[in-house]
Image: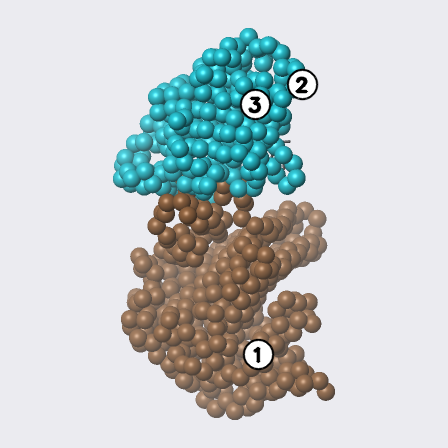
Chain colours: A brown, B cyan
Amino acid sequence: MPATVQEELSTEDRFLQAFEGLSDEAKNGTVEAVQGRRRRAIEQFEALGFPTNQLEAYKYTNVAKALRHEYRIAPAEAAPQASTEEVEALLLPDLDAHVVVTVGGRYSEERSDVGALPNGAFVGSFAEGANAHPDVFDAHYGQYADFESEAGDPEQSAMTALNAAFAQDGLFLYVPEDVALDKPVYALHLPSAGDEPLFAQPRHLFVIEENAEARLIEMRRAPEQREHAPGSFTNAVREAYVGAHGHFDHYIVQDEGAGASQHTTFDAYHETESVFDTLTVTLSGDLVRNNLTITPAGEFCESHLNGLYLGSGEMHVDNRTIVEHAAPDCVSNQLYKGILEDDATGVFNGRVHVHRGSQRINAYQSNKNIVLERSAQIYSKPELEIYADDVECSHGSTTGELDEDAIFYLRSRGIPAERARAMLLGAFARDVVESVRSEPLAAWLTDEVGARYGAGQALGVGS
Amino acid sequence: MPLLEIEDLHIGIEDTEILRGVDLNADGGEVHAIMGPNGSGKSTLAKVLAGREEYEVTQGSVHYDGEDLLEMEAEERAQEGVFMAFQYPVELPGVSQQNFLKESVNAVREAQGKEELGAADFIKMVREKSDLVDLDEALTKRSVNEGFSGGEKKRNEIFHLAMLEPRLAILDETDSGLDIDALRIVADGVNQLRDSDRAFVIITHYQRLLNYIEPDYVHAMVDGQIAKTGDKSLAVELEERGYEWLSGDGVAESKASEGNASENGAATEPEEAAVA
Ligand SMILES: Nc1ncnc2c1ncn2[C@@H]1O[C@H](COP(=O)(O)OP(=O)(O)OP(=O)(O)O)[C@@H](O)[C@H]1O
Ligand SMILES: [Mg+2]
């Protein structure tokens, strides 16, 4: 047997072993909806193994290969801490929010500052939420990121199954019928400090019931004093349910430094006349793979999915999106933009699937990339799969360099070359940033993009 | 010493020579018009003066205010007072005209040792200068040139010119695409900006513009060279006769007074151009 295969097997075996080694508390410490799935989940993972680039959906992103090294499969019991100062430094200026903090995948009661919530709403720990709302978990947990269902893409279920086997904690957001959160929820995810690479598996569930409203900003950050040890990996799963007439805005920023890899699965399901809006921003990372699946299941739904990825160094960022138009009269709008430099690689694979009978769908999908250096690479594949005849769908993908004529135009007006470049890159990212319905986050993103490309520099004279 | 001194300038791109020995002197207070057939090299000359790097200077020199212009970066030239209004202004989606102008104006001011413009002064200046070219103020708030009509783009270029107050202004076919009223407005704007320190180089196909902006010199550019220089009557003659008579070996007599022209700063003798 070739050595690589043996190594691959041993990678999965490590997880099987770790699963058997889970304490009773870790196995059973949550509600039936969670614990009842663990055994079947680990069995499914065992059958599938980590995704390799033999799978079409992982053609450019070999997860199995990225996991062959040593790391600790983090026991979820540990409750690492962060200081108040660390958290405060990472809040968004001018954002008045319900603040929740996780450290190393564990909800931190001490650092969270949820404040007063409208009646019946829950913002906090997944583990606690499961105990407080077992009925909600019964109804929703594992229903959308469903490793057992044949629907969706079986290629995508290995990581979901692995997460379901180990899931302990993360966020739970519950907004009952007719309730609107008047403030956004700001979730800060920090890694646990340490030199040892960890494999963490947070699990999040967001339930926005009929006619309810919420906005969630998730930030995965790793400040200097708690950088991920190289080789760290997070396998996160998110599920969102938005009831009829509900509205859920979800923004996530992935910025955890060059040592952190992650695979995220986000499955959102929304009902009649609801709005679901999500943005995925990737600013740093080693290997980052995001699987986003949205199912507008009722009529007159609006789904917005946007993305922005800024790749540098050796970063590899892969966004795969699927929109399942299972009901007629819906609109989906998708815009993913990337800027890549150095040896970074960007992958975009978006699929819009209009089911039979889903008439009068408007689906737009666009992926645009700027490659700053020849050494950076981009693979873009937008796909439309349409089984209805009365629809309006479009998709497109462009990849190019910065426009020399535009740079010259700015320079000929006295603006230094570096600054001209920064202005144009900021302008490129602008429509994605402006899709954000939170001023403080939009402002923060604008600054991040500006700072990345040197817009912060004082105006120089010539060069 | 003239403000702009172009000597025997040869410009190529890849293996083609586009400019084949251009001489031109322009001093503060002067207006020079350049006319010439399509593809004769007028825009190339303008872009080389503004600092476009894709063109290769194979021979000759350009001095601006006594300094070697070709050694300077594009932004440095702008900061030192060189301005080109583009024949085809570039659309910059997502770049707000306000921010762009604020940076542009302040980069130029800083280089010239002037104080940065405050927000209130900037707004006042925008209002003043957009009035000068009758540019709809809404356009000063949009993305630069994005979705502007052809005429609006041209007016916007003159608006930038007015904002930056350069010493050497090169206008590349700013009159093309303007309706007759806009033409007059743009011309009036330029005329108001004429002063003894500022030189204009105006590239145009139409003598009409020169009725409004009276040039001191008219240069006919043919095939990468200045084939003839004269006063404003040359523009009338060119419009009547075309350029054919200027290419090839023989250069016909011009009604313009050549002696006067060369004495006053246009360096190229018609004879010289013809034999080069
Ligand atoms: N970047 C370039 N690459 C290749 N050829 C070029 C380039 N720029 C200009 N040329 C060529 O050089 C010649 C002169 O072009 P230029 O734009 O200077 O002409 P022009 O006199 O401004 O013409 P018009 O009146 O049509 O604006 C043309 O044949 C043109 O195709
Ligand atoms: Mg031209």
Give me the C-alpha separation between circle 3 and circle 2. 14 Å
- Looking at the picture, how far across and down is residue A362, in whole percent? 60, 48
- Rendered residue at 45%/77% (across/down): A229
Image quadrant where one finds the N terminus of chain A = bottom right
Q: Secondary structure at mark 3?
A: strand
Q: Amino acid at mark 3?
A: Ile
Whether disc 1's CB lies below 8 Å from ligand 1 is answered no
Q: Nearer the viewer, residue A443 or A286?
A: A286
Residue placed under numbered mark 3 in the picture: B226
Q: Is residue B138 visible?
A: no
Which chain is indicated by disc 2?
Answer: B
On the image, the x and y values in percent for residue A403 come to 54, 45
Q: Which amino acid lies under the numbered mark 2 shown in the image of this protein?
A: Asp
- Quick one: SS at disc 1? loop
Q: Is residue A386 above or below residue B70?
A: below
Q: Which residue is mark 1?
A: A67
Q: Left or right: where does residue B80 sit relative to residue B154? A: left
Does the residue at mark 3 contact the one at mark 1 (Cβ under 8 Å)?
A: no
Please report, as a chain letter, where disc 3 is located: B
For the point 34% across and 50% down, the residue is: A458
Instruction: From the image, tell me which residue sits under label 2.
Output: B249
